[in-house]
Amino acid sequence: MRIAVAWLTLLALAGSAFAEDPWTAGVTAEQKQTARALLDAGNTLFLAHNYAGALDKYRQALAVWDHPAIRFNVVRCLIQLDRTAEAADNLKLALKYGAAPLEEAVYNEALAYEKLLANQIGDLDVRCTQAGVAVTLDGQPLLACPGSQTRRVTPGHHQLVGSKNGFLTKSSDIVVVGGQRAEADVSLVAMSAAAITHRWAQWKPWVVIGSGLVVVGVGGLLEYQASVDMSSYDHELALLCADTGCDANRPIPANVADEKTRARHESEIAIGVMSAGAAAAAIGGVLLYMNRGMAIYPSVEAMPGGGAVSLAGRF
């Protein structure tokens, strides 16, 4: 801990080392004083293990004076907070001018962090040529197309989303490996490019429905015939039994009784036929629903500028 305190103190007090170099050009004495005061406050919080508070102070100092030494203290905080991707980005800025603006021990520590973070961070290159497409990475704005962007990210899964009015929004999961580079080309398909297709020829479900309805009609005719036969039976029975009635001593003639039997049999057949026809029509309705139009969009290969998010690893 004594070494860490010594480094932080050197960073706060090394005003004489800040010559007129690129990192000091245009910075007034008042700005330097303000930045050092904020740096001191951040150092105190850092040594108290309040890394979030220290990070806030360091960033306030950077807003006044973007010095590599202050930037490196930001790196220290981000590493402690497990925000390695941000730490790697800030470390790159801290080492922008090499060893000159840093104490030797701090510079060596920065180089050690650079090696350490090399395998803990991956690079993601995103490209897009379609004008007006907005691309986000893990829910944060990344790119307004056309253009390209390289982002350093932590290893693992990342979500890349491209969107534009009148186009299908495309989301893709990208796996980035630490110390390696992944590439993504974002390209969307216009909704108007869809082709409507069906499982089967559109006439087939209607044939099934129509056939079912025809069968129901045949069953209806049979039921009508059964009703006519039953009416005929009732009429003949009324004539035969009108005067003396019909009983065991005067049975109903066989030809009349057969009409009743035939009418019942026809009615049973009619019910079966209508049930089968109704079932066929219902199946036809299900087939019609299943055969509703589906929008099929062309692939990236089949349509210039259209399609999806295509990914390729470059290792």
Image: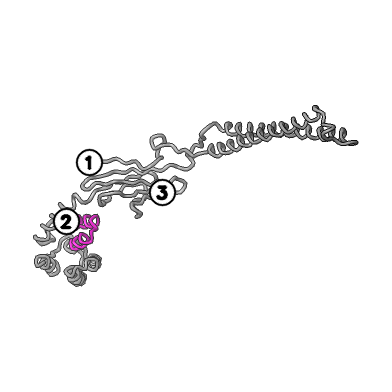
Which residue carries the number 2 mark? 95
| Viewer-proximal residue among 40 and 65 | 40
Residue under the point 16% across and 63% down: 69
Determine crowd level at label 1: few under 14, some 14-19, many 20+ residues with C-alpha closer than 10 A: few
Disc 3 and disc 2 in contact, CB within 8 angstroms: no
Instruction: Describe residue 284's horizontal placement relative to residue 110 as left or right.
Output: right
Magenta-tinted stretch = 72-95
Residue 218 seen by the camera: yes
Q: Nearer the viewer, residue 145 or 234?
A: 234
**Which structural element holds mark 1?**
loop
Q: What residue type is labelled 2?
A: Leu
Compute the Cα span from label 1 to label 2. 25 Å
**Residue 268 vertical placement versus 125 (above, below):** above
What residue is rendered at 47% in x and 43% in y?
A: 191
Which numbered disc covers residue 315?
1
Find disc 3 in the rendering and name its residue. 163
Residue furthest right in the image: 243
Q: Does the magenta stretch include residue 89?
A: yes
Mark 3: which amino acid? Ser
Residue 185 position, x and y percent, is 33, 43
**Label 3 to label 2, Cα distance in Å?**
36 Å
The quadrant the C terminus occupies is top left
Q: Is mark 3 on a helix, strand or loop?
A: strand
Q: Residue furthest top?
A: 255
Note whether 71 is above or below 159 in the view shown: below
Front of the two marks 3 and 2 = 3
Mark positioned earlier in the residue sequence (1 or 2): 2
Q: Position of residue 176 (x, y in %)?
A: 27, 47
Mark 3 neighbour class, 10 Å CA radius: few under 14, some 14 to 19, many 20 or more: some
